[in-house]
Image (cartoon, rainbow, N blue to C red):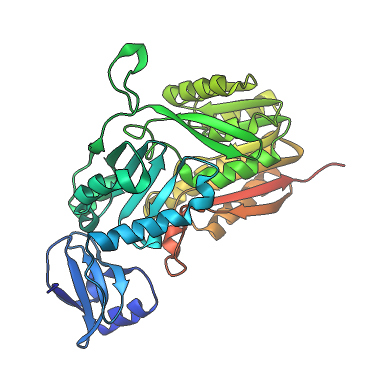
Amino acid sequence: MLPECKLTRKGFQWARSGHPWVYRDDLEYVAGDNGDTVRVTYEGKTLGVAFLGTRSKIALRWIDRSPAPATPDEAFWRRRIEKAHARRHALALRTNAYRVVHDVADGIPGLVIDLYGPVAAVQTTIAGTERLLAFLGAELQGLLGVDAVIARNDLSVREKEGLPREVKVLAGKAPVHTGEGGRGPSWRFWVHEDGPQGRVVVPVDPHAGQKTGLYLDQRENRWRTAALARGRFLDAFCHIGMFSLHAARAAEEVVAVDSSDASLEQCEEAAARNGFKNIRCEQQNVFDYLKDAVGRGERFDVVVLDPPAFAKSREEVPAAVRGYREINRRAMGLLNPGGVLVTCSCSYNLSESDFLGVLREAAADARVSFTVIERHGQAADHPVLLSHPEAAYLKCVVLEKESTA
C-alpha cells in the first residue's frame, strides 16, 4: 500500500486547476519519505499518485490523476517513455539530436532524456526520478537504440532536493574509441540537423558539454532564422555557433561572437567540417563587442542575440532588465534599415510581456521603429502543459527595423 498524503481544501482547489505541482503548505497530512510515490487524497477520496518531495517547497509532483491510479512500475515508465519518443517521430527524420522526454509534459516529473545519436543523456532533478536511474540505464539502450546512457546530473537545482551533483555513466561506453591524438575513448562525436538551408553537422560532448551537449531548445528558432539570413549576419552569444552554421549558406558573411575560447574552437571546427569559409569567430565579451562595433560604425542585415539567462531568480530581474535593454539597444543600432533582429531570453523570471517591454524601451533609446514579425518559444520537443505556464521559459522575438525606402 502506498503512503498517503492528504490535501487541504486550498490544496484540493489548486489540484483541480491541473497544475502538476502541489506545495508543502497545501498538505494537511504527509506520510512517506523523500522520493516516495504516494497516494494523494482529499476527504477520503483518492485523487491520484505523485512523487513526494520533503526537501523543497514543491511537495508533490503528479504522476497520474485518477480515482483508481496504477502503481507506477517499470512497465508503466517504459510505456510513458515509448509514448514520448513516438511523439518525436517527425523530428527524428531531420535530426539525431533531440529531447525524448521533457519532464511533466511527457508524464514523468523531474526527468529529462536527450538523445545524441549513439548516446542518451539523462537528467533527474527530484528524488522520485533519481530512483529510476538503474532502470533507465538498463532500458534506454534498447528503447532508444543507443550505445551508452549518461546521467548528466550536475545541475544546481538538485541541491534543493538533497541530491548530489554528479556525472556518471549508467550503461555502455564512450562511442569514439580513439580520442584526439590517439588518447583513449572519447565522448565527443558528431550529430546532425537538417535545417532550411541543408544539413549541418556539429560536435557534441554529452559527458561534459553545455546543457547535455547542445541547446536543443533553440532548434526551430535557428532554423527559422536561417530562412531569414542574408548579407552580413551577427551571431552574438554564439556558443558553438549553431545559428551561424545554419545561416552560413544564405549569408555572405557570418560573425560569431562569444567569450569562450573553447566554444569558438568548436564553432571553427564545425565550420571547417561543413565547408563554410564565411564564418569568422570573435572571442570577446559580447557587451564590449556590441559597444565597440557601434563605435566602429559596423552594420549587419541580421543580428541574433541569444544570451544566457540574466535572471535566475526574482531578485536578479532588475539587473537582468538593464542587461537585456543594453544589448538590444546596441544591436538595434547595428542593423541596416530593413534589417532583422532575432532576440531571445531564457530567463524564466522575465515574462514575455516584460521582455517585449524591454524591447520597446531599447527601441525608444535607439530612436528607431521596429515591427514584431514573429514570436516563438522553445522547440517542439520541449512541450509545455497548458496548466504549467512556468515551463514556458524561452522567448524568441523577431523584429524588423523600419526601412528608409
Residue drawn at the location 56% of the way across and 60% of the way down:
353
Which percent across, then down, holds residue 250? 70, 32
Q: Nearer the viewer, residue 265 or 339?
A: 265
Above/below status of 292 relative to 183: below
From the viewer's perspective, is 51 left or right of 190? left
From the viewer's perspective, is 374 left or right of 117? right
Q: Quadrant of residue 388?
A: bottom left
In the rendered image, which quarter contains the N terminus? bottom left
Q: Nearer the viewer, residue 275 or 42?
A: 275
In the rendered image, which quarter contains the C terminus? top right
Residue drawn at the location 18% of the way across and 44% of the way down:
164
Q: Residue furthest bottom?
A: 43
Number of labels in the image equals 0
Which percent across, then down, holds residue 361? 62, 51
Above/below status of 49 relative to 101: below
Which percent across, then down, holds residue 278? 65, 21
Residue 349 visible (yes or no): no
Q: Residue furthest top?
A: 181
Q: Residue furthest right?
A: 405
Residue drawn at the location 51% of the way across and 53% of the way down:
380
Which percent across, then down, holds residue 260? 44, 26
Above/below status of 269 relative to 100: above
From the viewer's perspective, is 251 left or right of 150? right
Residue 233 visible (yes or no): yes
Q: Quadrant of residue 8?
A: bottom left
